[in-house]
Amino acid sequence: MTAEDSALITRTPGNPDRVRMQAASSDISNRNLRAYLDHLRGAGASPATLRAYRTDLVQLEVFLGRAGVEPEQADTAILRRYAAYLGTCRYAPATAGRKLSAVRGAYAWMHSRELVARDPAAVVPGPKRPRLLPATLSQTEAGELLDGDVAPGATGLRDRALLELVYGSGLRVSEACSVAVADLDLAAGRLRVTGKGDKQRIVPVGGAAADAIETYLRDARPELERGRGAAELFLSVRGRRLSASDVRRIVARGMARAGLPRRSPHALRHAFATHLLENGADLRSIQDMLGHASVATTQVYTHVSVRHLKSAHRHSHPRAQ
């Protein structure tokens, strides 16, 4: 463990026996944990996932180091204590779950390569997560967002095209940022998307999104691109690709312009899936369009509105009337 890692450990005021570990940005000392991250990188894990897991595994190293235990020596008992420690840190359940997922993944990988005699993390449970319905927009609200007046200038046309595509094709923010002009086939109404793990999929591009993109390509993108030969579809005023924070600001401006409650860009992806389901699309097709490896994930994203459930019950159940 490096001196920088040791500096991450601080005593909590008023409780000298309690350890608080700060978020770590230093590298991992243990070569097997580093090799696990290299394995994830080779398997196509995203930069964001690698950064998060690096921080999580440094935090584990610090905890084990205080107990005088190397990662290869850890047993289930000490990993359960680590899970209990995470529960005292007021992390959101999703964050604590990710941290334990990093630990379980690392030990499963080490065990598969006989770097540890057994997998001590396999039976360490994660935190219980509340099953919350994702924030989304109704079909009326989506219309208000997309059918209002376009903001003036090239950026207004860009913003309209971006919103139409994210909602119309169910893109993640990172996917919208990385879409290249060459990925588009507007004549065929489709788009090649590179998602998590560098997995590619083909998604449809609807008429409204295609019209907005054509207008943007013709009347706005050349002004933003400034002859620099940028590959990405959506560009900033400086001619660079948009960042995730740029997309969040664009969505926030659009919501404010339409007089709607503030929503994240992911709400448009939720709305895409929910509105497809409400209008008769099957769950497996929605799964393919969203790029989900498991249909169980799709079921979380595509919650059905109470209004739709009542309508389906009223029209389908023999005793509903």
Image: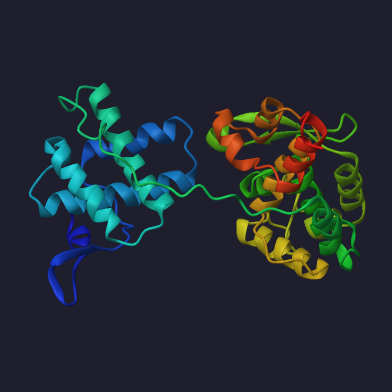
Q: Is 274 in front, or is 104?
A: 274
- In this picture, is 155 found above or below 276? below
Q: Is 16 in front, or is 6?
A: 16
Residue at point 48% right, 33% down?
44
Question: In terms of image quadrants, where is residue 113?
Answer: top left
Q: Is 60 in front, or is 229?
A: 60
Question: In terms of image quadrants, where is residue 316?
Answer: top right
Residue 241 x, y percent position in the rendering: 68, 53
Number of dots carrying numbers: 0
On screen, residue 281 versus residue 23, left or right, reads right
- In this picture, is 123 found above or below 99? above
Residue at point 47% right, 37% down?
45
Residue 25 x, y percent position in the rendering: 34, 57
Residue 14 x, y percent position in the rendering: 16, 77
In the displayed orientation, state which residue is furthest to the bottom. 14
- Quadrant (top left, top right, bottom left, bottom right) of the C terminus: top right
Residue at point 63% right, 57% down?
243
Residue at point 21% right, 29% down?
119
